[in-house]
Image (cartoon, grey):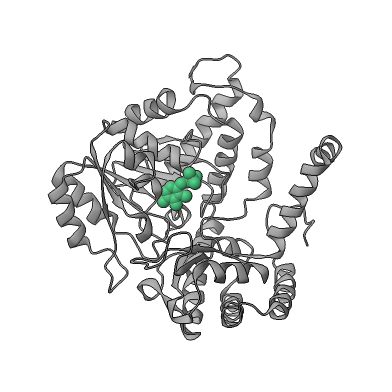
Amino acid sequence: MHDRRDSLELVDREIHELILAEERREAETIRLIPSENYVSAGVLAATGSVLTNKYSEGYPGKRYYEGQKFIDQIETIAVERAKALFGAEHANVQPYSGSPANLAVYLAFLQPGDTVMGMALPHGGHLTHGWNVSITGKYFRSVQYGVRKETGRIDYDEVRALCLRERPKLLWAGGTAIPRVVDFAAFAAMAKEVGAVFAADISHIAGLVVGGAHPSPVPVADVVTTTTHKTLRGPRGGMLLSPSTHAQALDRAVFPGLQGGPHNHTTAGIAVALKEAAQPEFRAYAQQIVANAKALAGSLLEHGFDLVSGGTDNHLILIDLTNKGIPGKKAAKSLDRAGIELNYNTVPFDPRKPFDPSGIRIGTPAVTSRGMREPEMKQIAAWMARIIAAPEDEGLAQRVAGEIRELCGRFPAPGGLGIGE
Ligand SMILES: *Cc1c(COP(=O)(O)O)cnc(C)c1O
């Protein structure tokens, strides 16, 4: 790794220095964006390897290019590890990311104009679950469900009634801002009633699922889609898991339906991440993510924050800042200046615009990867409360940033070369 960095420095000092600066930034800040993480040095090494040189359209044993002796082995290992880890009959590790993985589901099972039902983006769903600006909301007839206003949670009777009325061909569960356990069995049952394909998108929670910290959709879903770079701690990529009955349709949808050559360096990184996720320590990691989120939520409540649904069951917390009298974007920017990185987010039934909504979204996967635990969560909540009470106090932001650098120094970021420490 060291000599590769040296050669980058020689070839392109500008990019080299920006990478080092980003590494330092990631090391010195508290990263609460719930979809982000730190990969291990092993995942980084695989991702930055010569595998990026190779074309391998097709699947192991059935390629359109020669020279696949080692690539086939790598992809087969990744597929076998995915199947074993999730208990699935079939796995496809080629989708370039989460969004292409989801598109493959449409291509495998739907015709243009068919009805798809998913969670609305402002309620916590993903763009690719039929939101109007996405191709999935333009080329298909989309019906969207949400959470109940009083509870901030999905009302399964309400969703079932909508499903019976609209009769979708494809039903999505999962999302990007859901702080509570998703009842995959309830979704599977309503999909079955109307003959819909049930797709569970576990992008955010895949690591919790393999670590036993969230129920798995694998036995009940027709297809499970996931990113590999969130709680799973792999490189940026996507994956499909399914019963063998859907294997051919899904494989054909990914290639040649949507993509050309797979990103073999990413496949190798996914294989490494799946090996790491199969270790007993990863189970402990997944449990600690949830324990940390609960601790953080508890402290935030003590500081008077209003949490959507009142708390969390998983890695994620959605905060409605209305009672603090500060919009989400302003809060996110003030916190960023102090070294706490998160994103502004709509809250369900948000009266404000998506570009400047009422909430912020946080999560514990990245800080847990650094080894932080409950006492640090309490400290983070206290910092957040101080900054949000005085968002324009530059002196305070600088003082907190210093305290945060000190804390981060005690919890080195995995994967880096220690430059930021
Ligand atoms: C992150 C995410 C995706 C999309 O993944 P990309 O890799 O950003 O394309 C899809 N669905 C859900 C629920 C996600 O959280």
Q: Is residue 152 left or right of residue 271?
A: left
Q: Position of residue 203 (x, y in %)?
A: 44, 50
Q: Quadrant of the N terminus?
A: top right
From the viewer's side, name the closer residue of 167 and 78: 167
x and y, in percent, of residue 258 in the image = 43, 28
> Which residue: 51% across, 66% down?
362
Whether residue 372 is situated above or below residue 133 in the rendered picture: below
Above or below, 300 against 369 in this view is below
Residue at x 33% of width, y 39% of height: 138
Residue name at image x 34 percent, y 40 percent: 136
Q: Which one is in front, 402 or 331? A: 331
Picture quarter with the C terminus: bottom right
> How many dots with numbers?
0
Q: Is residue 339 visible?
A: no
Residue 393 image offset from top left, x and y in percent: 67, 80
Q: Can see residue 36?
A: yes
Q: Quadrant of residue 112?
A: top left
Left of 307 or right of it: where is 173?
left
Reply above or below: 268 against 219: above
* Vertical position of residue 374 compared to residue 333: above or below: below
Residues 257 and 278: in front is: 257
Residue ranking furthest to the right = 10
Residue 135, how many percent across, how many down? 37, 38
